[in-house]
Amino acid sequence: MAELQTFPYCALCKHVRTGVDKWICDAFPDGIPDHVLEGIYFLTLDHRKPIEGDHGITFEPKESSLLVNNVEEVVQFIFEAVDRLSKQQK
């Protein structure tokens, strides 16, 4: 099981719910699958786009987030940086 001490950008999503021992959200009400959570944490999976099994629910910033006006821009910047780094390593 994925470590719960990680900080996937799920924590900034309005669909995330409090779980006892796992991450849960509206997209994955029975628990975010490990491969999805790990993909989000390691930025190999972009849940701003649909993922199989997500019931059509994708990442949307929480209104209560301190970064509410910039969350989408920050996530986009992170994905672009990771993409550039991966291209440089090839």
Image: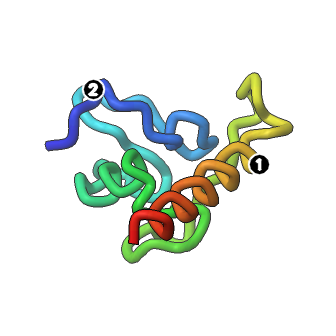
68 w.r.t. 39: above or below: above
CA gap, disc 1 and disc 2: 30 Å
Sequence-first disc among 1 and 2: 2
Residue 33 screen position, x and y as percent: 27, 56
What secondary structure is marked by label 2?
Answer: loop
Residue 87 screen position, x and y as percent: 49, 70
The residue wearing badge 1 is 73
Residue drawn at point x = 58 percent, y = 57 percent = 79
The residue wearing badge 2 is 20
On the rendered structure, is 16 left or right of 41? right
What secondary structure is marked by label 1?
Answer: helix
Q: In what quadrant of the picture does the N terminus appear?
A: top left
Residue drawn at point x = 34 percent, y = 31 percent = 6
Which residue is the extreme one toward the left? Answer: 1
Instruction: Report the front residue among 54 and 40.
Output: 40
Mark 2 Cα-neighbour bin, 10 Å: few <14, some 14–19, many ≥20: few
Residue 88 screen position, x and y as percent: 49, 65
39 w.r.t. 70: above or below: below
Q: In what quadrant of the picture does the C terminus appear?
A: bottom left
